[in-house]
Amino acid sequence: MTINIQSGHDIGQVLEHLRSRWGWFVAFGLAVALLGFISLGIVGVATIASVYLIAIFMILIGGTEIGVGLSAHRWGNRILITLLGLLYIVAGAFALANPVAGAVGLTLMLGAAMLATGLMRVYFATLLPEGPKWIVGAAGVVTILVGVLIVAGWPENSAYVLGVFLGLDMIIYGASWLNFGLFLRRRLQHVH
């Protein structure tokens, strides 16, 4: 399916083009959500799968960094960027070789990232006008609580945290595509 969007086309024209394919979006959304529920059912396997996927991405990123580093004009930048790329490759290879230890490290990083993200959301909420302030602040508090739960349960929770996040993400992602497909279907019904 290709969509040719040229300047002058609006979102209504794009939706009109996609309208007849609503069933594919619904089917895709249901399939992804189902895989999310399956991931939650086999959360340990999903955690290891997550580690493997992250490790492969780290190796690919490392290779790209090395390519960028080798093409840098200044020797200082060339060495630093190349070393960072090598670090990515070594970390990715370590996670591939020992996915359980990789899960432990990634779980701690996820918990720390959730805490930092939550704190930033709360801070930014204080800068917003009254309306959206509470929603952003509440999202920040929830993110902080999730981060605290992850860090407080670490390293024991490393066997399942990444798998739970993967499963929940797939369910939410699938639900969004399902909702989009149903939106297109409703749009089709209003035309006829």
Image (cartoon, rainbow, N blue to C red):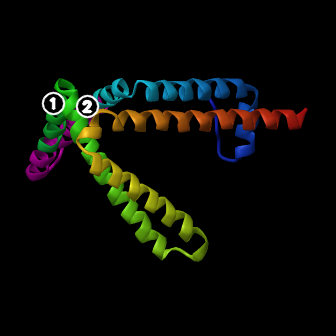
To which residue does mark 1 refer? 94
Give the residue drawn at x 48%, y 70%. 125
| For residue 45, above or below residue 178 | above
Quick one: label 1 or label 2, which is nearer the N terminus? Answer: 2
Identify the mark at residue 102; answer none if there is no mark. Answer: none
Mark 1 and mark 2: Cα distance apart in space: 8 Å
| For residue 72, above or below residue 16 | below
Say if the magenta span includes residue 77: yes
Amino acid type, callout 2: Ala
Expressed as whole percent of the image width and height from the top left, the position of residue 118 reads 39, 60
Which residue is most to the right? 192
Comparing 55 with 103, the one in front is: 103
**How many C-alpha atoms fall within 10 Å of the one at disc 2: few (<14), some, or many (≥20)?**
many
Expressed as whole percent of the image width and height from the top left, the position of residue 61 reads 26, 36
The answer to whether 156 appears left or right of 124 in the picture is left
In what quadrant of the picture does the C terminus appear? top right
Expressed as whole percent of the image width and height from the top left, the position of residue 154 reads 25, 45
Local SS, label 2: helix
Local SS, label 1: helix
Give the residue drawn at x 28%, y 51%. 152
**How many C-alpha atoms fall within 10 Å of the one at disc 1: few (<14), some, or many (≥20)?**
some
Give the residue drawn at x 25%, y 39%. 156
The answer to whether 161 appears left or right of 101 in the picture is right
To which residue does mark 2 refer? 55
* Stretch in magenta: 54-82
**In the rendered structure, are the residues bearing label 1 and label 2 in contact, judged by CB atoms less than 8 Å apart?**
yes
The answer to whether 21 appears left or right of 157 in the picture is right
- Residue 26 sits in quarter: top right
All told, the count of numbered labels is 2
